[in-house]
Image (tube, rainbow, N blue to C red):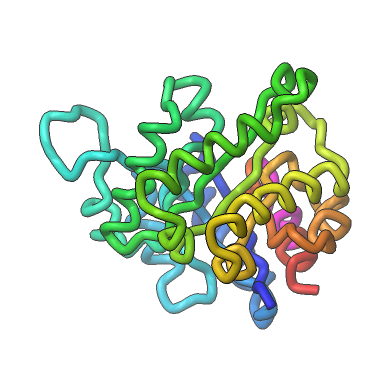
Amino acid sequence: MRKKLVAGNWKMHGGIEQNNSLLNKVVAGTLGADKATYAVCVPYPYLSQVSSLLKDTHISWGAQNISQHVKGAFTGEVSAIMLNDFFCHYVIVGHSERRTLYGEDSKIVSHKFKAALENSLIPILCVGESLDQREAGLTEEIVGEQLDAVIELVGVEALEHAVLAYEPIWAIGTGRTATPQQAQDIHSFIRNRVASHNTQIATKIQILYGGSVKANNATELFVMPDIDGGLIGGASLLPDEFISICMAANN
C-alpha cells in the first residue's frame, strides 16, 4: 500500500522568524502522525535554516527548482550538488510556474529530473494542463507528453525513485479546485500511462494532487484511490491549515 506524502511548496515566501515559528508548530502538530510522510520545499536562501530546524525530525525538506547543469557559468542557477550540501531530500521539477513564467519546456524539465536523480535527490515531477487546454479536451495529451518526455530520457525505471504531482494550472492560486473525481480521473490516467511501461512501478509510485488543496477539501481528495497526498502551495504557509491537511493524509 502506498504511503501518502504531503509536501509544502512555499514558493517565494518566507522569512527567518516566520520560518522558525511555522516549522516548530508543524513539527509539533504532526508528531506521531506516522501513517503519512511530510516535507517542505523552500526558497534556496532558507535551506540552511530549514535543514537545521528539521534535522532529527519526521519532516523532510527540499528545494523548488534545480539546474540541469552540474556547474559552470550559469549566473543565478543552483545545482544538485549544492542542494546536497544542505541534505535536501526532494526537489520540485517542472512546476507550472516554471513552465509558464520561465519558459521551461518538457526537454528542460526532463534534464532537470535526470540531474536530480544522478545526485540522489527525489524529484517531484509536476505535470498539468491550462484551462484552455482542458476546455479543448487536451488534458491527457498535454499530461502524457510531459510525462513521456521524462520516460524517454531516463527510462520508466527512474520513476521508482521519484514522485509525480498532477497540478491543473487552472486550479493553482485561483481558488478553483478540480472535483475529487476530476482529479482522480487524471491520476488514474497518469498511473495507467506509467503502467503501460511497467506495472510494478505504476503500482508503487506516489502521485500527488497539487491544485489548491485546503483543509476543507483534503480528506475527500485523499480518499481517492490514485491520489497519494498533495503538493500544497499557499496553505503550507499557514501552520494550522497545513497540519490539518497532513492529518487528512494520516487517516
Q: Residue furthest left?
A: 72
Q: Is residue 7 visible?
A: no
Residues drawn in magenta: 234-243
Image check: 134 left or right of 200? right
The front one of 111 and 25 is 111
Image quarter in which the C terminus is found: bottom right
| Residue sitting farthest toward the front | 196
Give the quadrant of residue 239. bottom right
What x and y, as percent, mark residue 150?
Answer: 43, 44
- Does the segment drawn in magenta span residue 239? yes
Looking at the image, is 125 positioned above or below residue 39?
A: above
Residue 16 point in image, percent of width and height: 44, 48
**Residue 50 appears in the figure:** yes
**212 magenta-colored:** no
Q: Is residue 127 above or below residue 239?
A: above
Task: Pick the quarter of the image with the N terminus.
Answer: bottom right
180 shown above or below 251: above
Q: Horizontal and vertical percent for residue 57?
A: 49, 76
Magenta stretch prevailing secondary structure: helix
Say which residue appears at 80% left-offset and 50% top-offset. 184
Q: Quadrant of residue 245?
A: bottom right
Above or below, comparing residue 129 to residue 3 in the picture: above
Residue at 52%, 56% in the rendered image:
40
Residue toward you, 97 or 28: 97
Q: Is residue 174 left or right of residue 109?
A: right
Q: Residue at x 64, y 56 (%)?
A: 207
Residue at 53 percent of width and 36 percent of height: 146
Question: 128 or 32: nearer the eye?
Answer: 128
Where's residue 241, x and y in %? 75, 53
Is 68 displayed left or right of 54 in the figure? left
Which image quadrant is residue 23 in? bottom right
**Count of marks, rendered view:** 0
